[in-house]
Image (cartoon, grey):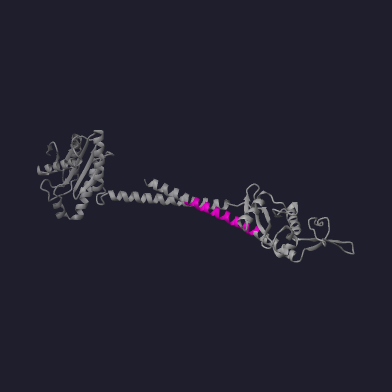
Amino acid sequence: MRRQYIAMIAVFWFALVAASAIWNISQIQAANQQADVQVARSFFELIVTVREWNAQHGGVYVPVSDLIQPNPYLNVPDRDIHLPNGITLTKVNPAYMTRLIADLAQNGNKIRFHITSLKPINPGNAADVWETQALTSFEREAQLELYSWDAQPQSFTYMAPLITQSSCLKCHEQQGYKVGDIRGGISVAFRTQPVVIWPVLLSHALIALVGMVAITLFGQQLTRAFSDLERLSQIDSLTQLHNRGYFDLYLHREFLRSRRQQSSLSVILCDVDYFKSYNDIYGHQTGDSCLRQIAAALTATVKRPGDLIARYGGEEFVMVLPDTPAAGAIAIAEMVRAKIETLNISHKGSHVSNHVTISLGVAAFCEDLKEETLLERADQALYQAKHAGRNMVASAALTLTI
């Protein structure tokens, strides 16, 4: 049972460590995702700020080159300016500038911007499926931003709406936009870094291992402590025999087994003759020593593993002999009686001998006998032995006089 408790604690510990690992991994993933959102949001706000600067200045002029050609979708009279030195300047409006920045960023293979609209002037600004869903959500549900992660390839896409400002109406008023309308959006996409979870798994595996070792060691010590405590609770401190409480449990168990298996069971009650006089003459310390010698003699005589010897109380001892009929129990009782005499412990106060002796009562199990009756018969037999002169063995059926 105690091993089951230790196993339950170990399972609980592993579950706790696993829950901690899962929680920490989820927190790391959430932090990484929040960082992705913050990075994309910062890029978007930066692009919007640059666009607003461009719009406030009515666009900016840059030299025409292989990389920058006049914007065919910008229909204004001053789109191109030809300088006396032969250089041609072309106006770059916010939308065109956004595309140029997006192309530059994409060439660096770091980040992708895409300005898009549900009603684009430039077909290159047409929205893809995800962008279309996002723009629709901006218009219908007034959402301020949308984002998603794609595992294959591992990337992150963010999009927020472009709100029409007064500076935007120069180019977009003809499309019917007014200040505050959502005229499109800018999506920001980039590759995300994989979440590194092996340090978390390694650290938690180490914690689980250390905890398991601690649980095992502590469990072993606790098991030994409980075993020692249980043993001490069952042992008589003076004689080191089992005590009365353990005897009661043992007799009950063996009685049920004997009745179930229809096997024999005998009980022997022992009492030291005139032990009160012994204590009065020699003192209680000597009396304790006497009881320890008697206990050792009982143990040396009754050696079968299933037999039990216990201190019944005071100067009384009891023996439980499983699979032993009455005749065998009487023979063992006689051996015990003779063994005590051979100890030759002086006893001046005895009225039966000049050394310590014991009287014994034997009772055996029969089919119609109850557990409490078995012990009562052993006690009655002991009373018969005492009444008949002591230093003898008596049974519930007959008395043997020595």
Q: Is residue 114 visible?
A: no
Left or right: residue 22 compared with residue 242: right
Left or right: residue 204 compared with residue 37: left
Left or right: residue 260 compared with residue 154: left
Instruction: Name the foreground residue: 51 vs 41.
Output: 51
The answer to whether residue 37 is magenta is yes
Dominant secondary structure, magenta: helix
Residue 104: where, in percent of width, then height? 75, 56
Rendered-image quadrant of the C terminus: top left
Instruction: Name the foreground residue: 289 vs 214.
Output: 214
Rendered-image quadrant of the N terminus: top left
The answer to whether residue 205 is magenta is no
Q: Is residue 327 visible?
A: yes
Residue 90: where, in percent of width, then height? 82, 60
Residue 26: where, in percent of width, then height? 55, 53
Instruction: Name the foreground residue: 49 vs 179.
Output: 179
Q: Residue furthest top?
A: 262
Query: How many discs mark residues in the rendered view?
Result: 0
Residue displayed at 64% across by 51% down: 133
Range drawn in magenta? 16-40
- Residue 392 lies, with reference to residue 117, above or below; the image says above
- Residue 6 lies, with reference to residue 328, above or below; the image says below
- Residue 340 lies, with reference to residue 115, above or below; the image says above
Left or right: residue 143 compared with residue 293: right
Instruction: Name the foreground residue: 383 vs 214.
Output: 214
What is the quadrant of residue 55 in the picture?
Answer: bottom right
What is the quadrant of residue 147 in the picture?
Answer: bottom right
Residue displayed at 64% across by 53% down: 136
